[in-house]
Each structure stands twice: as structure tokens, then as C-alpha cells.
């Protein structure tokens, strides 16, 4: 059996988690705070906040921005449901745009066309960890027309004076856009540390802040951490200080803090991320690329261009000319060989919850074409070269079985 993306759990992780358990402090505490500082140092973000998931961080980011009913947030149709759900939870309207031609990422030209006086934020998604066209997106939100149309509500929006650019980079930890680390490119960037991600904390996420310099990043951090703990102005650690029991609740917050047990995993993962994790993931993707490069009907994923380099989160192979049903049959034939593959993603307008609010896949032809023939192959640290070759053979045999080509 070749699984899709198991985490790398070894003695180092077990030892650090044990140390956290034995330390007497298992919820948010010193390890989480250190992990936040190390994430900010790695990504060059001005500040980083950890949460129980990327979704929680993104939703709190929208609430910090003061986004609510009557507002619009531009998102890609090609993404995971979390991107749309956080907008809907805030009572705002997700306005979906199609992919750029031949790309899994959102099309800036369509973002420009979707901007309105109600637009409060744009959420690009770095699919598979490959960075979106941030220069084009920033030019749109910072354009004089966007600033003129913008109707701020609340202090944060007034201070920004334009729609926010907050990325859902659940896949993109460690990726570079034109030489800059994601986390220090958009105004805010959410990363996921879910079990299948490049860097995991079992469940977890971080929001990196890179707001214009006139923002008080410490104040934003304080608001976000407080609201991740019910809106209570003292966390459990602060309350253990002698005589420090009294607290207030400044607003009805959420409960989505990261624990020190999660951070213990993350600290080990982060320490070896550049030296071990990313190089191995890159090597896996390059071995697939080399094996498939002789086939004209195999469309290979983009991993780098100039100083832009993705995080090698997914290997998204596309088989030219096959239908959605044929793709599904190819996946079934691969599964018969005990190999787990996946599809990233079913575009949101094909899912019940978003059809119910009026989305139609016929409005997103590029998203559909990218999805219909896509198969995500296993990529993980412990995947051996022999296993990669086995996946390659299984894919080729499955494509031959379904299409007769090969
Ligand atoms: C594009 C995208 N956004 C957001 C998320 C949510 O991440 P989390 O599970 O950490 O909330 C995911 C998770 O897979 C994702 O793929």
C-alpha cells in the first residue's frame, strides 16, 4: 500500500511531544509562543499568530478586518471549501473567479473585473503551494480606482483605505514569490499545518501579518490571540502568575488556540523543514517530472519560474484529452494497485453548498478543465524512489487501460 501523504513521525517528534507532555504545560504556552516567533523569522512576516487550524486563523483575520453582512470577498472557484466558508461565516458574500488560463491559481484579470464598491478583501489561494501572481493582485487592490470605490467600515478598514489582500496559503509554507517568502508578500497569509500538509502539527495553522508599516502589529496580534481564547484578556499561562486570577472578556470570541503539544511537533518540523523536508519533496516531484516528461499527453505541474518557487505540496498531474469520467476510471485503476491518489480540488461551484447560493460551474470553464483531468499523486518525505517508480508504472498502466494510449 502506498498512502497519499502520511506525516513524518519519528523519534524526534515523539521525544519533543513527550517533553511537552512532561513539562506540566500542555495548552498554549512557551512552545506555541516560540513556534510563532520562529514562523515569523522563517517567513520574514512582521508577526505570526498560531491557531487550531488555518481556517480559524483566516476567519479571525476577516473578523479583525471588520468584514460582515453586505460585504464581498473575492475568492477563486478552484479551492478547498474553507476559503469560501470563512467568508460565509462572517455573513459576507464570496465572489468567485475562474483560474488563469492553464493555471490552478486565480486569474488577476477576473479579479479586477469582479471588484466592486462592496469588495473588502481578495483571498488568493496558492494551489499546491505555487504562488499566485501577487504583483498583479497587489496592483489591483492598491489601484487608485480600488481606493476610490472602497467604502471602509471600522477603524481597520479606514486605516487600510483599500481592500485587503489576505492569502489562503494553506499549501504554501516555504514557497517563494520572486525571491520573497510567502508570509511576507500579501497583507496577511494563512498557512495550514493539518496532518497532510508539508509541515504538520496534527491540526493547526498560522496567520502571518505583513500589513503596511503604519499598522500596530502587536495590537493586531493581541486582538487575534485574545479572540482565539473567547475574547478573554488573559490566557491560561498569564492567569497562573501569582495573584493574576482576575480577567475580563472584551468581546464574545472563539476557542481556536494552538496547544503546546501541537507546537512541539511544529518546532521539530520547522527545524528540519529547509534542510530535509523541502529538498526531499522537490526530489520526489522532479522524479515524477522526469518519468512523465516523455509523454506529450501528460501535462506536468508548474514548480518554479525564475525566483518564484512553490512548496512542492502536491504533484498535480493532468492527462490531456481525458474526460472527468475517464479520469475517475484512471483513479479506480490506480487504486486497484493499492496506491492512494487524490483530486485537488472539486471546484466549489460543483458542490451542493455553493450551488445553493447560486454558483454554476458553467461560469468557470478553466476551473472545470483543470479539475476534470487532474490526479494528485503521493508526495511525502518517506516516499522512496522505488515507490515513486511504482506509482509511475501504475499511472501509465491505468491511462493505457482507460484510453488505450501508452
Ligand atoms: C486551500 C485550503 N485552504 C484552507 C484549508 C484549511 O486548512 P485547515 O484544515 O488547517 O483549516 C485547506 C486544507 O486542506 C486548504 O486546502
Image (spheres, grey):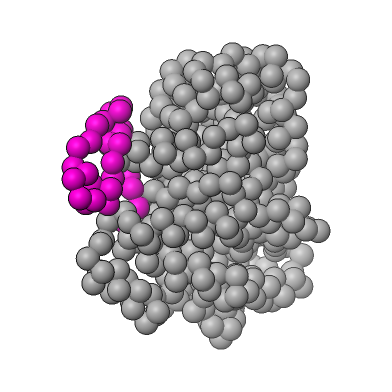
Name the quarter where the N terminus is drawn.
bottom left
Residue 83 vertical position relative to residue 6 in the rendered view, above or below = above
Residue farthest toward the right in the current orientation of the protein: 306
Which residue is painted at 55% across and 22% down in the image? 157
Residue 329 location, x and y as percent? Answer: 50, 60
The answer to whether 327 appears left or right of 11 in the picture is right
Quadrant where the C terminus sits is bottom right
Specify the farthest residue to the front: 243
Residue 390 shows in this picture: no
Which quarter of the picture shows residue 109?
Answer: top right
Total number of numbered labels? 0
The stretch drawn in magenta includes residue 159: no
The one of 238 and 258 positioned closer to us in this rendering = 238
Q: Report the front residue among 370 and 326.
A: 370
**Relative image position of residue 85 (x, y in whole percent):** 42, 35
Magenta residues, dominant SS class? loop
The residue at the point 54 percent across, 83 percent down is 384
Q: Nearer the viewer, residue 37 or 10?
A: 37
User: What range is drawn magenta here?
Assistant: 231-259
**x%, y% of residue 121?**
57, 28
Confirm whether the magenta stretch covers residue 257. Answer: yes
Above or below, 85 against 321 in this view is above
Q: What residue is rendered at 63% in x and 48% in y?
A: 184
Residue drawn at x 22%, y 65% as measured from the top left: 24
Q: Could one spot residue 250 in this view of the protein?
A: yes
* Quadrant in which residue 298 is drawn: bottom right
In-image side of 324 versus 105 (left or right): left
Which is more toward the observer, 388 or 319? 388
**Location of residue 36 in the rendering, given as x and y in whole percent from the top left corner:** 46, 55
Position of residue 368 relative to residue 320, above or below, is: above
Amino acid at each position: 500500500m502506498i498512502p497519499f501523504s502520511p506525516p513524518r513521525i519519528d523519534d524526534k517528534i515523539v521525544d519533543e511531544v513527550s517533553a511537552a507532555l512532561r513539562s506540566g504545560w500542555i495548552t498554549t504556552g512557551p512552545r506555541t509562543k516560540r513556534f510563532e516567533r520562529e514562523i515569523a523569522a522563517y517567513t520574514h512576516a512582521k508577526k505570526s499568530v498560531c491557531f487550531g487550524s488555518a481556517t480559524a486563523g483566516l476567519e479571525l483575520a476577516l473578523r479583525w478586518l471588520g468584514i460582515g453582512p453586505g460585504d464581498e470577498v473575492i475568492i477563486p472557484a478552484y479551492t478547498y471549501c474553507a476559503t469560501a466558508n470563512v467568508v460565509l461565516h462572517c455573513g459576507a458574500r464570496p465572489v468567485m473567479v475562474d483560474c488563469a488560463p492553464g493555471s490552478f491559481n486565480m486569474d488577476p484579470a477576473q479579479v479586477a473585473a469582479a471588484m466592486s464598491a462592496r469588495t473588502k478583501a481578495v483571498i488568493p489561494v496558492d494551489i499546491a503551494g505555487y504562488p499566485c501572481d501577487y504583483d498583479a493582485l497587489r496592483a489591483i487592490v492598491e489601484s487608485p480606482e480600488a481606493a476610490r470605490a472602497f467604502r471602509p467600515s471600522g477603524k481597520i478598514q479606514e486605516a487600510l483605505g483599500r481592500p485587503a489582500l489576505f492569502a489562503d496559503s494553506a499549501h504554501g509554507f516555504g514557497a517563494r514569490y520572486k525571491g520573497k517568502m510567502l508570509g511576507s508578500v500579501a497583507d496577511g497569509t494563512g498557512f495550514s499545518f493539518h496532518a497532510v500538509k508539508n509541515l504538520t502539527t496534527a491540526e493547526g495553522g498560522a496567520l502571518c501579518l505583513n500589513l503596511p508599516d503604519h499598522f500596530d502589529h502587536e495590537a493586531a496580534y493581541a486582538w487575534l490571540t485574545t479572540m482565539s481564547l473567547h475574547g478573554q484578556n488573559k490566557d491560561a499561562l498569564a492567569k497562573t502568575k501569582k495573584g493574576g486570577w482576575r480577567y475580563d472578556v472584551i468581546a464574545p470570541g472563539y476557542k481556536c488556540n494552538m496547544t503546546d503539544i501541537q507546537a512541539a511537533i511544529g518546532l521539530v518540523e520547522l527545524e528540519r523543514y529547509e534542510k530535509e523536508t523541502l529538498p526531499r519533496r522537490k526530489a520526489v516531484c522532479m522524479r515524477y517530472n522526469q518519468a512523465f516528461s516523455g509523454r506529450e499527453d501528460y501535462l506536468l505541474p508548474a514548480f518554479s519560474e525564475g525566483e518564484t518557487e512553490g512548496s512542492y505540496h502536491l504533484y498535480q498531474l493532468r492527462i490531456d484529452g481525458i474526460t472527468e469520467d475517464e479520469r475517475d476510471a484512471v483513479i479506480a485503476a490506480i487504486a486497484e494497485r493499492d496506491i492512494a491518489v487524490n483530486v485537488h480540488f472539486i471546484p466549489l461551484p460543483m458542490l451542493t453548498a455553493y450551488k445553493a447560493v447560486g454558483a454554476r460551474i458553467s461560469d468557470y470553464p478553466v476551473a472545470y478543465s483543470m479539475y476534470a483531468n487532474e490526479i494528485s499523486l503521493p508526495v511525502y518525505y518517506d516516499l522512496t524512489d522505488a515507490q515513486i517508480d511504482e506509482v509511475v508504472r501504475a499511472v501509465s498502466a491505468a491511462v493505457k487501460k482507460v484510453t488505450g494510449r501508452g
